[in-house]
Each structure stands twice: as C-alpha cells, then as structure tokens.
Amino acid sequence: MGCCVSTSSKSTCSSRSNGEMAANPSCFEIGCCVHKKARRTFSDHVISLHHLASLPSRIFTNGKSRASCIFTQQGRKGINQDAMIVWEDFMSEDMTFCGVFDGHGPHGHLVARKVRDTLPLKLLSFLHSSESRRNGSGKGKACFKGNIKPENGDSQKDLSAEDKLNSTWREAFMKAYKSMDKELRSHPNLDCFCSGSTAVTIVKQGSNLFMGYIGDSRAVMGSKDSNDSMVAIQLTVDLKPDLPREAERIKRCKGRVFALQDEPEVPRVWLPFDDAPGLAMARAFGDFCLKEYGVISTPEFSHRLLTDKDQFIVLASDGVWDVLSNEEVVEIVSLAPTRSSAARILVDAAAREWKLKYPTSKMDDCAVVCLFLDGKMDSESDYDEQGFSSATLQSNHSGNPAESDDGQKSEPSLQRNFTVRSSEENETNNVVQSIDVEDGTSSADDQNWSGLEGVTRVNSLVQLPRFSEERPKS
C-alpha cells in the first residue's frame, strides 16, 4: 500500500538484557515480555516490524487467527474504505490488539490503512517509553497479572494498582492517537485535508480490556446474564456531532452542527463559512479542514475487567450498525455455525438488511472483527469447509485490492474496479482507475470520488469545501 509502517514510531529499545528482564517473572511490565515462556522482548518486536505484514500473529485481510475472525466487504460507493486488524502476541503472548478503521473522503481508504498499520506501533512505543520512565525513576514497579485489585496495605497516598494501570494505558492511548494525527497532518504524500478515518481499538490482556476510540465505529460484547441468556453490552459510544459535549465543543470553536432536511437523523459538522464538508462524526483522524472548528482526534478511553460470563467482542464499522442493532449482531455471531465464519455471516446479514431497509441507497462498506474471549477457535477442517484459508487471505467478496507481503511498498500502481450507480441503482459503467498509493493521488482526473454521490445518509461527507481566496470574516 505504500504507507504501512511509520518510521517515526520506532522507539529506543530497552538496554536491559533478556536475562535482566526475566529476573522478575511475576511482574508484567507494560508491554515488555517478562514471563519466562514469553521469549520475545520489545526489541525483538521492533526488529520484526520491518516485515510487518509477514508477522504470523497479525492479520488484516479476510481470515482468522487463533481466537478471532475478520471480514470486510466493499459497498456500492467505490473502493472499500474500511480497514481492520487483529494482532495477537501484541507485546506479550497473552495480549491481543484489535482495530476497525472506517475511512471517508477522497483518500479515506489510504488514511484508514495508514492508521491501521501505524497506530498499533505508536501504542507499542508509548507503552514501552512509559515503562522505561518508571524504571528509570527508581519508583516501584506495578505488577499487573490477571484481575487488578488494590492491596489493603497500600498507603492512601499511593495510587492503587488499578489506578496506575488505567493511568498508564490512558496516557499511551492519548499519546498514540495524538501522534497518529500529527503524522497524518505532516505526511508529504497523503492529503488528509478533507479525508479521514474513524478508529475503534481494543487491547485484551488476560482479564483486562483497554479501549480507545474516535468516530462512529463501535465495539459490542456478547455476554451471558444470570439466566445464561446471551445479552449485548455496548462498550463504546458513537461520537456523533449531536452529543451535548461534542456539539458544545464544536460550536465553541465556531463550527456548525445541523442535519440536512432530507436526513434529519444524521447530524453533521459544517464549516462556519461554507456548507461543507458535512462530516457525520465529531472526532476523527485527518479531516484537517475541520480541526480548527471543533473536530478532534482525542480518543475516549475506558478499562473493563472481563468475567467468565463474557463470550466475545465485535468491532465493526457503521456499515453494520446502520442496519443491525447490538442485539441482532450478538445473536448472529452467537448462532454462527462455526466461529471462523461469524464475521462473514455478520457482514452478509448486514448486506441483506441494506437491500431491505434502504433499497435506493448505496450500501456502505462493512468491516467486522470478532474476538472470542476464551481464546478458542474452530478446527482447521471446519474452517476450510467455510471456504477460507487459515492464514491471512484475500477474499473475492472483500472488494479490497490485495496487499503485498512486505507491507511497505504495496501496489505502487493499484488497479481497482468500482461501479458508479444512479439513484435508481442502475449500473452505468465499470471504471478502471489507477491509484498511486505512495502519493495518494488518482491518475484518472476526470473521475469524481463516487462516495459523494447518491443518497447522502450513507456518506460521512456531503461535499468538499470550495475555498475562495478571501474567507468571510467572523
């Protein structure tokens, strides 16, 4: 893809030897592998990141891992702008990173993929830096293993172990998201002025679940209640512009929030001097045309302790949530014939609902990550029967161009096919357009971005701003 690994996200590796790190095997040191069975250190991770896409524990196209399955399908608006990732053995053998990213705007697909590949590295870097500072300060090390409970003998002046854990992870998420947005702003070849991406990211480590998110992609957990019935628990909040706190910030920064007359249920963010771009979320990566007017990239963060009742977590883009409720999603995943097929079956269900509920609308892209919390997956034979490969694979249904194995200079001349549809959903033509992923530009200048056409309720942006040389003074 050309924009996979951020060289600026590399951090200074710990100078401690492997033997020194293993001296205290009972202590989990925020991202460093210190258990005796966990042989890889953070330094080993940094070395392996030069070949990021070939890591066996990291999947980002339709397929499965040891405890998850992921699937994405292109909608009817053009190139698939959704991206997703599951990275097992993330910092340690019992840790998993998951994320879904929904791009929007002319270069939204490039922004989403850039965030997918770079944000986890930044989180790794800031967690390692935090641990290094703690060790260098001479303060006691907080040991986190399993459920986090403060000890009764601790002084009231000291933060509890859980507070320290929350503080460390919150800081890492905040810094990683801030650094990610800063890198997008200064990227020499990727225009993010009117393009951006959502992000819903989670890290599971033992019974701890850490979450950071912006935009309207969502995480929902399937859990069993006291009657052993499956219930849906929403883990994140859709950060829409009409939320009181979000709307207040945007208006304070001179941005405008209102919905169009023909879609009163979709509040949008508008420039103070132009009825553009009409962003349907209050927080996002990129979208720098609105960053001075209240749209931010600061994530919401939360920490949750998982229990034996919690079964699985579903991360998905709004292409799923626009047509399926939390309860319907949990039911579909829980009733899937095999765990390996759950993500694909959920996307298929969303596609059917789009046709039923919005027959004249263009179906949005859908991306789903299903993480099963007991760490189990189907047998290899069950998975093969579903038509998948056990390794990272490219599905014929995904609509995503295949990505190269090195993950660094993928497809410098990427060919894609998309169908532009009228409001009557008639196929008009099949345009082959060459995209240069390195510089984020299109070689077919006469083709408009199809995501701005058709029914606007499925679009994150309504129209691109048309700046004149002199802007109205406020």
Image: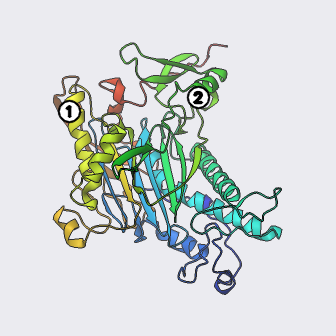
Residue located at (41% from left, 61% from top): 373
Q: Which residue is mark 1?
A: 355
In the rendered image of this protein, does residue 239 appear above or below residue 115? above
Identify the residue at horizontal 47%, vertical 53% (top origin): 116
Residue 400 visible to the viewer: no
Q: Which residue is mark 2?
A: 246
* Left-right relation of 93 to 13: left
Query: Identity of the amino acid at label 2?
Result: Glu
Residue 455 relative to residue 276: left or right = left
Q: Nearer the viewer, residue 339 or 258?
A: 339
Identity, as a three-letter code, of the amino acid under mark 1: Lys
- Residue at the spot x=69%, y=54% of the render? 167
Secondary element type, mark 2: helix
| Among the two numbered marks 1 and 2 on one chain, the one whose residue lies closer to the N terminus | 2
- Residue situated in front as seen by the camera: 22 or 334: 334
Q: Residues within 10 Å of mark 1 (few under 14, many from 20)?
A: some
391 or 158: nearer the viewer = 158
> Which residue sits at x=59%, y=40%?
297
Label 1, label 2: how many angstroms apart (C-alpha)? 32 Å
Q: x, y (%) of residue 355?
A: 20, 32
Q: How many marks?
A: 2
Q: Position of residue 235 (x, y in %)?
A: 48, 45
- Residue 81 got which mark? none
Q: Is residue 443 above or below residue 154?
A: above
Can see residue 184?
yes
User: Taking 450 as reference, is 348 left or right?
Assistant: left
Which quadrant of the rendered structure holds the C terminus?
A: top right
Neighbourhood count class around disc 2 (C-alpha, 10 Å): few under 14, some 14–19, many 20 upward:
many
> Quarter holding the N terminus?
bottom left
Q: Looking at the picture, how far across and down is residue 333, in whole percent?
A: 29, 51
